[in-house]
Image (cartoon, rainbow, N blue to C red):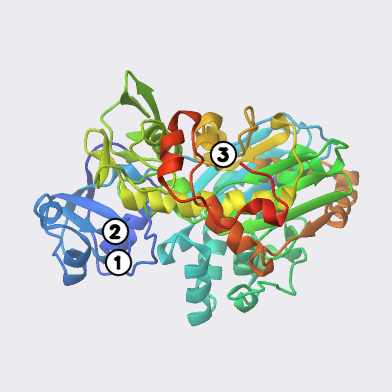
Amino acid sequence: MTTAGPGPLRLEPTAERSLRDLLFERGVEFLCGGVSQCGGCKIRVLAGEVPVTDEMRAVLTAEEIDAGWRLGCLADAHSAVTLEIAQWSIAVLEDHAELPFEPAEGLGAVVDVGTTTLVAQLVDRGSGSVLKLETALNPQARFGADLMSRIHHDLAEPGTLRAMIRGTVGGMLGRLCEERPLEEIFLVGNTAMHHFFSGISVEPLAAVPFRSPALGPRYFEARELGWSLKLQEPACFLPCVGGFVGSDLLAGLVATGLFESPEPGALLDLGTNGEIAVGCRGRIRCASTAAGPAFEGGRIGCGMRAGGGAIDGVSIVDGALECSVIGGGPPRGLCGSGLVDATAAALELGWVTPSGRMSHGRKSIGLAGPVALSQADVRELQLAKGAVAAGFMLLLDGRRLTASRIFLGGAFGNYIRGESARRIGLLPSWADHPTAAGNTALRGARKLLLAGSRRQHILDSVLASTDHVELASDPRFQDAFVDCMRFPVSSQRESDRRAEPAPTPNLQAVGCWAW
């Protein structure tokens, strides 16, 4: 996939490839599944004609339309157009860490089938080194950034998402191996990705209690998948744990070593589907939370991925906000780490109250250039962080870990500042030095690929020691979620706490520690 870089992009739609298809190929995501509900796929027309529809007028302001803004999910054109779409360039967290390995002949590959992005590595089994890497957007994202949108689409049109993901992954692997034979391929992903890829019905994942009977590993010959690869052993999509907790978290437990550590710890893989595990050798509890795409810039008014032009950091300097921009150029939007920083700074300055309301009648807070933090953006962040914090609390169930034993996985977890995560209540107040663990899903998959004779023992140990907790059926979760949506009260902001009603319910009543 070719992604958009800084500067204008000229596209020439045809009868076979519509403007929407070309936009998606350049990284523009249709966060609400292309039904014009969120306004998250805005593009700006610099030259050419993209007609304005009634649906666009319902989402965009007259000023935005006059300035050339359109909704990508509804965009149509019959001739060449020049657009500004650079904010959707892909930045994927890679992983080249050296790992222990048992020397073996030939090449292998591992694939992280993420909800948003795909990463594939070609691995030399003799040296354990990564030879090449491919990244791409998950093509299913055109049917929605969140899993539920895709599940509903798959139920309506079975097989569409399966063909998409298999074709894209097969193309990535083909470019990696360049007709050289592959001995093994291991794929990891959450339970929905496991089912989509494997052709398993996602109906059990469409409603509570989200329990699927088909969580085990799945094996495929190359011809079954439509791949023209020389594959010596069937490709394996590693097993899921339960609910929406898939083999990506299982691989994360392998990467961090939590499954064999005598010391308790936690892994939070924060993305559209937030996955959490707490425990140590022989006793690990895990769960998933529907965090939504806010941590990756989705459904945020000026949201974007962590690419060139993204505000990725916000700090307070002399009572004002100072922003850092990836690439050092003019700001184009706000990525996940910048969103958390901006909200944390606004809380400290008293511009946002613990309830999440902007103070003194503000509708938005200007950050830099055209980029601003809106009231709706703060609410989206509250929903995301509330789900993760509540799930983490319930899994901890009164335990207090060493802060350095909290591992943050995924791109968002790798770049978020611990201070800001604590200030908004995403992490507890004592978690002052969490460990940025990188792409734990990819690393764990590679560790298993290179484990040789120990591989099955490792998988059996992780699965035997890990219990899945279904948060949606836990009667405490909704109360915890409501309470965790509030922001913590800073010591400098005691007056805010006195001015607002106390949070209810009190989580002490359900055996959880205070943030």
Provide the secondary structure element on which disc 3 rests: helix
**Residue 101 placement: quadrant:** top right
Amino acid at the residue labelled 2: Gly
Q: What element carries label 2?
A: loop
Asked which quadrant contains residue 313, the reply is top left
- Residue closest to the eye, 85 or 392: 392
Q: Is mark 1 on a helix, strand or loop?
A: loop
Q: What residue type is labelled 3?
A: Gly
Crowd around label 3: few <14 · some 14–19 · many ≥20 (10 Å): many
In the rendered image, which residue does mark 1 sit on? Answer: 36
Q: Along the horizontal axis of the image, is 150 left or right of 324?
A: right
At x 74% / y 31%, what residue is drawn?
Answer: 402
Residue reaching furthest bottom?
156
Q: Earlier in the sequence, mark 3 or mark 1?
A: 1
Read off the residue under disc 2. 39
Q: Distance between the residues labelled 1 and 2?
A: 6 Å
| Spatial separation of the CA atoms under disc 2 and disc 3 | 26 Å
The x, y position of residue 358, in whole percent, is 32, 45
- Residue 465 visible in image: yes
* Crowding near the residue tagged with mark 1, few <14, some 14–19, many ≥20 C-alpha atoms within 10 Å: some
Residue carrying label 3: 413
Please give the name of the residue rendered at 52% of the width and 58% of the height, measured from the top-left corner: 168
